[in-house]
Each structure stands twice: as structure tokens, then as C-alpha cells.
Image: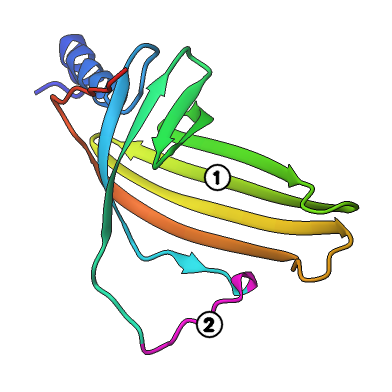
Amino acid sequence: MRKYPSRIFAAVAAAGLMATLSACQVKPGEYRIYKITALPTQMGADCGVDIDPRDSTTFFGASTIQIFATDADDYFLEYGEDVLIGSRSGTDYTFAGDEVAVEDPIDGTTVTTQHTLDVAISIKGYKITGEFVDFTSTTCGGNCDGIPTTQCTITGSFFGTEIKDVELERGV
């Protein structure tokens, strides 16, 4: 019996490993569709919501997300109604979006609402896991009587699987 595997065996094993690893990656011009389920979200103490500790659930939320790439450096995540830009490092992806809305409801008053969403995803074969942080804040400058300054941080996690042999159909 040989002490070391043959070169052919080693080459076949390496090819199998590379095929498995490449299944995790989204390549430019491709998209992957994932069915995910989310654990109940956690509202931060900064949200000002008192959750009754007697409340509980074993129901999960379900949704579908898509990941696609335009080139080797830019990846996009369709997450709910939002599309976030991100990047990839191995089998890990990070996506982020930021929106600032400025309003002047009355003379001398400016209300600014900022919304950020950060999503971190790990893909291993057909399995996907992820976490998100959704932050919203509202600040006021000027005559702010009756306009509160607020902020809220919502966190959550999800897991799921890639859906194979499915095509996206979108009306134009």
C-alpha cells in the first residue's frame, strides 16, 4: 500500500473541493435566489417600545432574497423592497445602505431622518445564514416644539437555502 495518494487522486479531490467552493460564489452576470426564514427581530432599548415579557412565538417569518454581481467587486442584495450594494470576502458577503431625508415642515425648522441597513451573509454550499442591523434616527433643528428626536435599532438573524432551477420574472 502506498503511503501517499496518487497524483490523480489528489487532482480529483482538489477539483471536487474547488467545485464545492465555487458553488458558494456569485459570479458577475449571475444571480442566486435564497428562501430564508427569520427569527423574531429584536428591538433595541433605544426604540422606546416596551415589549411584554409574557409574549412569545415559535412562528418564523419567511421571505426570498437574491444576490447578484455586476463585476468581481460589486455585489447586490435584493432584501425586501431595498437593493443594497456590498462586497465579498471568500464565502462572506457584507451589504449596506444609507438614506438621509431632510424636510423643512415649517419656517426655521429642519427635520432630518437617517436610515441605515447593514446585512452580513455567509454562504456555505446551499446554506445561507445572516444577520442585520436596521437603524433609524430623527433629529430636529430650529423650532422643534412637538417634534421629538428619536432613534431605533432593530437587529435580527436569518437562515435558509439556495433555491435551484428557478428563474426570476419581472414585469417591465
- Would you say 95 lies left or right of 35 here? right
Q: Secondary structure at mark 1?
A: strand
Residue at the extreme front of the image, as rendered:
107
Residue at the extreme left of the image, as rendered:
1
| 2 vs 1, front mark | 2
Residue 151 lies, in percent from the top left, at 67, 63
Sequence-first disc among 2 and 1: 2
Q: Is residue 90 visible?
A: no
**The C terminus: image quadrant:** top left
* Amino acid type at image mark 1: Asp
Residue at figure coordinates x 37%, y 89% from the top left: 54
Residue 9 lies, in percent from the top left, at 16, 16
Q: Is residue 48 magenta?
A: yes
In the figure, 8 relative to 151: above or below? Answer: above
Which corner quadrant of the image does residue 128 belong to?
top left
Residue at the extreme bottom of the image, as rendered:
54
The region drawn magenta spans 46-54
Q: Which residue is mark 1?
A: 118
Determine the CA span between mark 2 and mark 1: 24 Å
Q: Which residue is mark 2?
A: 50
Residue 71 lies, in percent from the top left, at 47, 12
- Would you say 159 lies left or right of 77 here? left
Which corner quadrant of the image does residue 122 belong to?
top left
Task: Check the image and tell me how it is coloured.
Answer: rainbow
Q: What's the magenta bit mostly, secondary-structure-wise?
A: loop
